[in-house]
């Protein structure tokens, strides 16, 4: 099974351990992992800022890069949602690319969805131990229906206890450019999210989107909380965490 | 109503610091969100009902001209005088004309958001006619000289304390602290106005084509008294509120109270079809309906058309993380929250509400609760596209995006630039591995948050390095 890894621009630059952990998870299950070296971004920043033309360029680029795989796996609900739910509409003025977008959408999976529904992985070798609370990132949840998948995976870990927070589906306030353009509002929304996370007293908050992770981690640390870890689910499933992978 | 949406950023920041408002918003959020979730769960086919309602609204909009004509014909058959208003000024002047023709000195009014759009009260009062708002929330804000901050709970930004203070001052009576007693006091004050008003004005949630009726959905008895007690009645509405049949109306009523207040049905649902008939014990002698366009036909022919399906339940704002924290006034016009972020620029011109479509996290919580499935984030994105086409984006946003796109579309240069960025970021992060202050692009991020530092090497470099070693 040839699986294209779309690592996402944010994970590439900010937190490569997410990519490494994803790579590890796929390899352990015997996937032949392809990493197209020219990959950069899915185009969502341009799309959401209204620059449709540039977003189309990115969509065509991604479609061409992943033309030769059985599946594409993305460790992000947000970028996964972009490819799976927006490319087709974005490219609807070109019948050729529209068809190719449909083709790609059908083969593209958010990581946890792929692990549960394609690979049916039922056990994980991880060094991670402790209690965690899971935050449902918006695009994964509402565009891709990622809700049960990560919980199913976490349930399969022996030394992990899941403590649900109040309002796990409430937005963390990241919103891409929103977090910088409306910093005051974004910061207030994530403050409330941190209240809910801290109330669980879990050792770690786990999620599937790096944008939301950076927002939550940045806020927790500014609040003086240096204890609660902020982890990507791929990191939890493999034990390959943050800076330790350098 | 005057539009102040261009001040969104400054106003929202001050609203975040308003402790009283924050307390009121928190209370309101809990009430609306929890009660809606509960009644939605009681239905096993809520999603099917949503789809059906969305289809009915679409069908209606696709044939709006013929349904409006049908409605007008039926309404006229029942004795209703129908007026069409293409501008705010026109609607307001029709109201004043009707009042003057009937020697009206005092008007009692039940809630109408169309009336807020046109600035009706101010206009009518300017012609020497007294207007009393009779919906409790609207009465409170009229006393306070404010605008509604929510489409179904206009005074939701006010605490009970605020109201106690306001009533004591305006009513010149001893201060009351109990909500029920405050309501009784307002009722006592309003009662004589109901009895001696010459004209009643209400909005209309829907207009039903097959019967020529107008409908109001309320929780207070004031709506029914406003339609039946004065000798002249004027209902104001807008063209998109038309529904083909009573069955369609019944369908909407399965969704509207549930989505709005979490009620299975509102306390009152009042249908009015023409004036008092021979033998009727009560009802107005004259019944006028004024239907507003202003922007609706333009939106009907645009990419934003889906927004016209709106049945004004307020669920999108109740569930919006931005609205929940800044409240309705920050949006600067009649309709706040996600639907306001679409309607305000759509009706007033996108250059007059630049922030609104951008001040959203695109979380789509609004889209999933909307009873008529309006794809609100998609519509906000379409408005962003319009802003981009019209070059209304800030220079900072425009050029940082251009630079990023230039690089990210050229993988070779991109890999070098990101390699350098990851290293610099790692150094800036220091031992704590977080950046406490960023300049230019990220300064608003680090005002109240840290930025976790990159770990130093890009995934691309680590991966390719590993591959080469093999």
Image (tube, coloured by chain):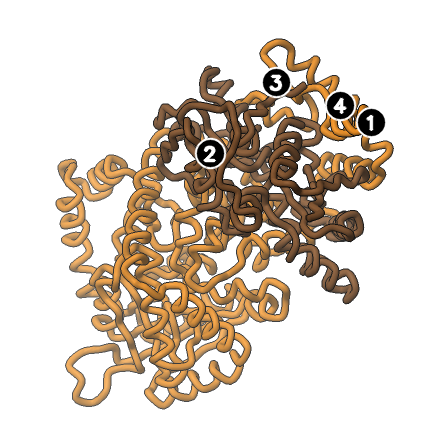
Chain colours: A brown, B orange
Residue drawn at point x = 28 percent, y = 53 percent: B38
Which residue corresponds to mark 4?
Answer: B421
- Specify the subunit that label 3 lies on: A
Task: Kindly state the secondary structure of the residue where label 3 is placed.
Answer: helix
Residues tagged 4 and 1 counted as in contact (Cβ below 8 A): no
Which residue corresponds to mark 1?
Answer: B468
Which residue corresponds to mark 2?
Answer: A189
How crowded is the residue under tag 3: few (<14 C-alpha within 10 Å), some, or many (20+)? Answer: few
- Between circles 4 and 1, the one closer to the viewer is 1
Q: Are marks 4 and 2 on the same chain?
A: no
- In this view of the protein, which residue sits in the foreground, B75 or B415? B415
Is residue A216 positioned above or below A82 on the image? above
Q: Earlier in the sequence, mark 4 or mark 1?
A: 4
How crowded is the residue under tag 2: few (<14 C-alpha within 10 Å), some, or many (20+)? Answer: many
Q: Are marks 3 and 4 on the same chain?
A: no
- Specify the subunit that label 4 lies on: B
Is residue A191 positioned above or below B331 on the image? above
Which residue corresponds to mark 3?
Answer: A244
- Between circles 2 and 3, the one closer to the viewer is 3
- In whole angstroms, how far apart are the C-alphas of marks 4 and 1? 23 Å
How crowded is the residue under tag 4: few (<14 C-alpha within 10 Å), some, or many (20+)? Answer: some
- In whole angstroms, how far apart are the C-alphas of marks 3 and 1? 21 Å
Residue B197 on image: x %, y %:
24, 65
Residue drawn at point x = 71 percent, y = 42 percent: A32
Q: Is residue B260 visible?
A: yes
């Amino acid at each position: 099974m040839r699986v294209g890894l779309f690592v996402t621009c944010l994970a590439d630059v900010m937190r490569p351990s997410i990519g490494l952990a994803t790579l590890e998870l796929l390899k352990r299950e015997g996937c032949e992992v392809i990493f197209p070296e020219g990959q950069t971004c899915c185009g969502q920043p341009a799309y959401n800022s209204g620059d449709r033309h540039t977003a189309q360029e990115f969509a065509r680029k991604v479609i061409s890069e992943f033309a030769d795989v059985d599946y594409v796996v993305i460790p992000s609900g947000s970028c996964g949602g972009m490819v799976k739910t927006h490319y087709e509409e974005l490219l609807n003025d070109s019948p050729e690319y529209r068809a190719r977008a449909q083709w790609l959408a059908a083969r593209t999976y958010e990581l946890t969805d792929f692990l549960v529904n394609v690979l049916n992985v039922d056990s994980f070798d991880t060094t991670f131990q402790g209690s965690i609370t899971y935050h449902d990132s918006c695009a994964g949840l509402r565009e891709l229906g990622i809700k049960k998948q990560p919980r199913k995976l976490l349930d399969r870990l022996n030394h992990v206890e899941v403590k649900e927070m109040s309002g796990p589906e409430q937005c963390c306030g990241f919103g891409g450019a929103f977090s910088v353009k409306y910093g005051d509002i974004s910061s207030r929304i994530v403050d409330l999210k941190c209240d809910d996370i801290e109330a669980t007293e879990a050792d770690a908050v786990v999620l599937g989107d790096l944008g939301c992770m950076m927002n939550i981690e940045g806020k927790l640390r500014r609040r003086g909380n240096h204890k609660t870890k902020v982890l990507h689910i791929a990191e939890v499933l493999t034990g390959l965490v943050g800076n330790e992978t350098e | 109503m005057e539009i102040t949406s261009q001040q969104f950023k400054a106003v929202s920041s001050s609203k975040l610091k308003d402790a009283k408002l924050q307390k009121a918003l928190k209370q309101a959020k809990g009430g609306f969100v929890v009660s809606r979730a509960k009644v939605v769960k009681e239905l096993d086919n809520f999603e099917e009902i949503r789809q059906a309602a969305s289809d009915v609204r679409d069908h209606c909009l696709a044939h709006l001209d013929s349904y409006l004509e049908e409605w007008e014909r039926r309404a006229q058959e029942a004795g209703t005088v129908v007026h069409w208003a293409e501008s705010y000024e026109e609607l307001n002047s029709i109201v004043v004309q009707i009042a003057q023709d009937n020697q009206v000195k005092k008007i009692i009014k039940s809630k109408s958001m169309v009336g807020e759009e046109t600035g009706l009260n101010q206009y009518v009062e300017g012609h020497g006619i007294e207007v009393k708002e009779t919906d409790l929330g609207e009465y409170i804000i009229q006393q306070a000289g404010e605008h509604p901050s929510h489409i179904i709970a206009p005074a939701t930004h006010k605490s009970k304390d605020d109201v106690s203070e306001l009533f004591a001052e305006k009513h010149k009576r001893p201060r009351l602290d109990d909500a029920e007693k405050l309501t009784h006091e307002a009722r006592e004050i309003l009662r004589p106005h109901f009895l001696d008003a010459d004209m009643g004005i209400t909005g209309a949630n829907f207009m039903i084509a097959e019967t020529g009726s107008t409908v109001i959905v309320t929780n207070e008895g004031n709506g029914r008294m406003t339609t039946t007690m004065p000798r002249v009645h004027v209902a104001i509405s807008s063209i998109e509120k038309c529904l083909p049949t009573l069955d369609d109306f019944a369908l909407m009523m399965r969704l509207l109270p549930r989505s709005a207040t979490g009620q299975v049905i509102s306390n009152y649902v009042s249908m009015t079809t023409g004036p008092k008939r021979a033998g009727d014990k009560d009802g107005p002698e004259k019944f006028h309906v004024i239907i507003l366009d202003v922007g609706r036909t333009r939106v009907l022919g645009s990419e934003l058309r889906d927004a016209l399906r709106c049945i004004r339940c307020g669920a999108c704002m109740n569930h919006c993380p931005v609205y929940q924290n800044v409240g309705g006034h920050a949006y600067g016009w009649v309709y706040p929250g996600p639907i306001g972020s679409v309607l305000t620029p759509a009706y007033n011109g996108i250059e007059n509400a630049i922030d609104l479509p951008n001040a959203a996290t695109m979380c789509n919580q609004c889209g999933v609760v909307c009873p008529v499935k309006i794809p609100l984030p998609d519509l906000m994105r379409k408005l962003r596209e319009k802003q981009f086409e019209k070059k209304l984006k800030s220079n900072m946003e425009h050029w940082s995006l251009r630079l990023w796109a230039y690089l990210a579309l050229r993988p070779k240069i991109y890999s070098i630039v990101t390699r350098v960025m990851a290293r610099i970021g790692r150094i800036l992060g220091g031992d704590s591995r977080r950046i406490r202050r960023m300049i230019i692009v990220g300064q608003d991020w680090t005002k109240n948050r840290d930025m976790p530092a990159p770990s130093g090497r890009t995934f691309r470099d680590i991966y390719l390095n590993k591959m080469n070693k093999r």
